[in-house]
Amino acid sequence: MAHPAQHDHQQHAGHEHQGPHAHQSHEHHGEHRDHAGHAGHADHAGHAGHAGHHEQHAHHGHGGGAVTWAAAAQATLHCLTGCAIGEILGMVLGTAFGLGNGATVVLSILLAFVFGYALTMRGVLRAGLDVRTAVKVALAADTVSIIVMEIIDNTVMMTVPGAMDAGLADVLFWLALAGSLALAFVLTVPVNKWMIGKGRGHAVVHAYHQH
C-alpha cells in the first residue's frame, strides 16, 4: 500500500512531467492558428487585389469618360492607314486594267477592308492570338470605322468634278483623294471615341494587348 506522501509525490512528479509538453503543445497549437489566420488574411488580400485588378481593367475598357480624343484619333489613324493603302491600290489597279469608275470604287472599298483588317490582325497576332480569334477581333474593331470612312471618302471622290476620271498622274486626283481621306478622318474620330467608350471598336484590341 502506497504511503500518502509517496502518492502525492508521484502525482506532483507526473504533473511536472506532463507540464512542459502540454505547454509546448499549447504554444504549437496557437502558432498553428496564427499561421492559418495569417494565410487566410494573405489569401483574402490576394483575392481582393485580383478583384481590384479586374475592376480597374473593366473600368478602363468601358468607362466612356476615360477615353481621350488622342486615343480616338490614334485608332482612327490606324483605320485610315489601311483605307488609304486600299484606296490608292484600288485606283492604281482600276487604271491599269481599264476598269470603269464603279468597278474601281468597288475594288478600292474591298481593298480598304482587306488592308484595314490586316493591320489590326498583325498587331493582335503579335500579342499571341490564333488566326481565327485575330480575325474576329479585327472584324469587331474595324468594321464600323472602315464603313464610315469609305462612305465619306468615296462620296467626296464621286462629288468632286473630274476626280474619278483623272489619271494617277493628275494633281486633281491626288488632291481630291487627300481631301477625302482628311475629311473621313475628322468625321470618324468622334465615332471611334464613342465606340471605345462603350467597350467596342478598338477597345477590343486594347484589351488583348494588355494581357
Image (tube, grey):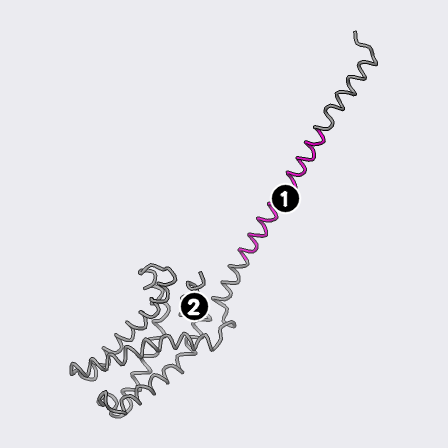
Q: In which quarter of the image is the N terminus?
A: top right
At 41% from the left edge and 70% from the top edge, which residue is drawn? 202
| Magenta stretch: includes residue 97 | no
State how far apart marks 2 and 1 are (Cα).
41 Å
At 77% from the left edge and 19% from the top edge, which residue is drawn? 11
| Magenta stretch: includes residue 45 | yes
Q: Mark 1 points at which residue?
A: 37
Instruction: Judge by depth and name the residue closer to the eye, 173 or 128.
Output: 128
Element on which disc 1 rests: helix
Q: Name the residue under label 2.
A: 203
Residue 147, above or below 45: below
**Residue found at the far left of this picture:** 98
What's the magenta bit mostly, secondary-structure-wise? helix
Q: Residue 130's image quarter? A: bottom left
Instruction: Judge by depth and name the residue closer to the eye, 160 or 116.
Output: 116
Is residue 58 left or right of 101 when viewed as pictured?
right
Give the crowd class for mark 2: few <14, some 14-19, many >=20 residues within 10 Å: many
Which mark is first along the chain, 1 or 2? 1
Give the crowd class for mark 1: few <14, some 14-19, many >=20 residues within 10 Å: few
Q: Quadrant of the C terminus?
A: bottom left
Q: Residue 84's image quarter? A: bottom left
Instruction: Judge by depth and name the residue closer to the eye, 125 or 17.
Output: 17
- Residue 210 in the image, given as x and y percentages of width and height: 45, 63
- Residue 82 in the image, given as x and y percentages of width and height: 32, 75
Q: Which stretch is magenta?
A: 22-51
Task: Name the residue type under label 1.
Answer: Gly
At 79% from the left edge and 21% from the top edge, which residue is drawn? 12
Q: Disc 2 or disc 1, which is closer to the eye?
A: 1
Is residue 190 left or right of 164 when viewed as pictured?
right
